[in-house]
Image (spheres, rainbow, N blue to C red):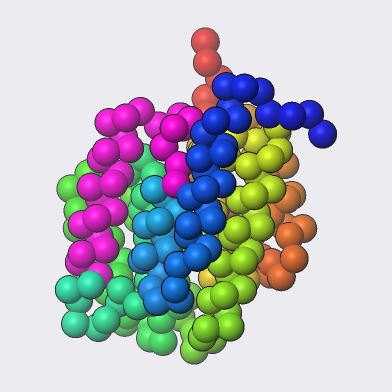
Amino acid sequence: MAEPTASRAAPRVFGALGLAAVFALPACAPTLISLGADAAYTASEERTTGEVVDDNKIKIELNKLLVDDSLGLWKDVGTVVYRGRVLLIGAVETPEAKAKAGSIGHTPEGVKEVINDIQVTDEGGIGSFVNDVAIEKSIQVKYLFDADIDSANFRVRSVNGTVYLIGLAESRAELDKALAIARTTGDVKNVVNYMRVQAPKS
């Protein structure tokens, strides 16, 4: 396999360190894990600096609203924000809790779209949590060292073995390879794709 070019190697090393830090976090809340994972990537993205700042503002407000909610949604709901698109993931026990999280997702200024893919299930627990973190780490590391994939533009999350991808791929070929890697990673049950493909540059 070809080695990454020098221009892409530096941010990828930074991403690897970020992944290690995320994997070392205690199993406490999806919001903490998703916040750490997003913070690991900013150096080599298709997003502008302004978009990164705006997304971080949305994410911080979302996580605060989830913490303040009386249903205790912060324990069960993770957030990913990319170019104003909000992806809500996690596992809750009732449709009402899922709907409430979806309503909260629309609250911050600057939100362009809310994708509410929270699972309504009583599955989960510490075993599933640890497995999901391992799945995310495995896929992210594979992306990190694949010369055909710019991992900085991919967000990877796993809930009960279902992997969610959101971000911006540089080409359909890059996205197809990323999807194939995710689908063939151990313990992955399903892959849900919310990636967009960047328009060709003129």
Residue 46 counted in the magenta span? yes
* In the rendered image, the vertical position of residue 153 relative to residue 76, given as above or below: above
Q: Identify the magenta region.
A: 40-66
**Residue 25, x across and y down, in percent:** 45, 67
Query: Is residue 166 something that shows in the picture?
Result: no
Residue 130 rendering spot, x and y as whole percentages: 57, 75
Assign the magenta stretch its main secondary structure. Answer: helix
Residue 155 image point, x, y percent = 50, 49
Residue at image point 52% right, 83% down: 126
Report the residue at 31% width, 66% height from top: 102
Residue closer to the observer: 18 or 153? 18
Say whether residue 25 is magenta. no
Using residue 87 as the reference point, say whether residue 187 is left or right of it: right
Q: Is 150 situated left or right of 168 in this image?
A: right
Give residue 190's quadrant in the image: bottom right
Q: In this view, does 66 lie above or below 11?
A: below
Residue at x 25% of width, y 83% of height: 71
Image quarter (top left, top right, bottom left or bottom right) of the N terminus: top right
